[in-house]
Amino acid sequence: MNTMPIRVYGDPALNEVTKEVSNIDGAIAALADTMIETMYAAPGVGLAANQIGIQKRLFVYDKGEGPVVVVNPVIVESEGEWTYEEGCLSVPGLSWDITRPNAIHLVGYDLDGNEISIETDEFEGRIFQHEMDHLNGVLLVERLDDDQKKAAKKLLRKRSLSVSAADPDGLHKLFGR
């Protein structure tokens, strides 16, 4: 199995806007294979290239029907509103209710260089929006309201500074759990 470590909150690679893929070739296909294996091993339902430190504009996902690769994705339309609990492989163990558009239209390319156009909603649309955020250097924490963001950043700073054996995720102390 060929996997790579997933970058976590605090890693500067997660805050950079990724660069478009100029040539869809064997190297991009190999990267996509590694990303898919990394996503499954995590386990997760989506993974953007910069989550493994590669500043390329592509993501992989699997909503339960097999892996899909999207290169140079763009959301061209969105509508509605849907709130759903969302987590992130780069912010492990935490999740929040996040409100996003419900329906979206995404365009991009597959690994053969063919243009793809997907109109979707709810779960698949949320995956696309979440991975697009990554490609644009935006982490889930930035989608929180001010109070949630403050509490989340405090917890994440604490995690990065020290890990207690009795409370490894810091949740007991911060949230009284």
Image (tube, rainbow, N blue to C red):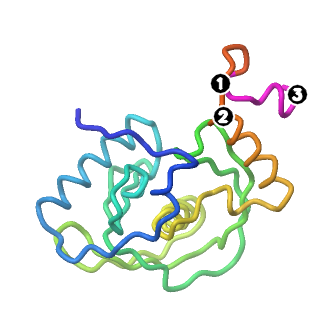
- In the rendered structure, does residue 172 fall within the stretch colored magenta? yes
Tell me where residue 126 appears, x and y as whole percent.
57, 62
| Mark before the other along the chain sequence, 3 or 2 | 2
Classify residue 61 by image quadrant: bottom left
Q: Please state which amino acid type lies under the numbered disc 2.
A: Arg
Gap in Å between the C-alphas at discs 2 and 1? 6 Å
Quadrant position of the C terminus in the picture: top right
* Disc 3 and disc 2 in contact, CB within 8 angstroms: no
* Disc 2 and disc 1 in contact, CB within 8 angstroms: yes
Q: Please state which amino acid type lies under the numbered disc 3.
A: Gly
Tell me where residue 158 appears, x and y as whole percent.
71, 36
Tell me where residue 110 appears, x and y as whole percent.
25, 69
In the displayed structure, 130 sits above or below 151; it is: below
Residue 63 left/right relative to 173 = left
Q: Nearer the viewer, mark 3 or mark 2?
A: 2
| Mark before the other along the chain sequence, 3 or 1 | 1
Residue span colored magenta: 168-177
Q: Mark 3 — residue?
A: 176
Under tag 1, what secondary structure? loop
Residue 157 left/right relative to 132 = right
Identified at 45% across, 37% down, the residue is: 43
Classify residue 92 by image quadrant: top right
Is 34 in front, or is 82? Answer: 34
Q: Please state which amino acid type lies under the numbered disc 1.
A: Val
User: Badge 1 local density, few (<14 within 10 Å), some, or many (20+)?
Assistant: few
Q: Mark 1 — residue?
A: 163
Residue 31 left/right relative to 177 = left
Identified at 15% across, 59% down, the residue is: 27
Identified at 62% across, 47% down, the residue is: 87
Under tag 2, what secondary structure? helix
Q: Mark 2 — residue?
A: 159
Q: Nearer the viewer, mark 3 or mark 1?
A: 1
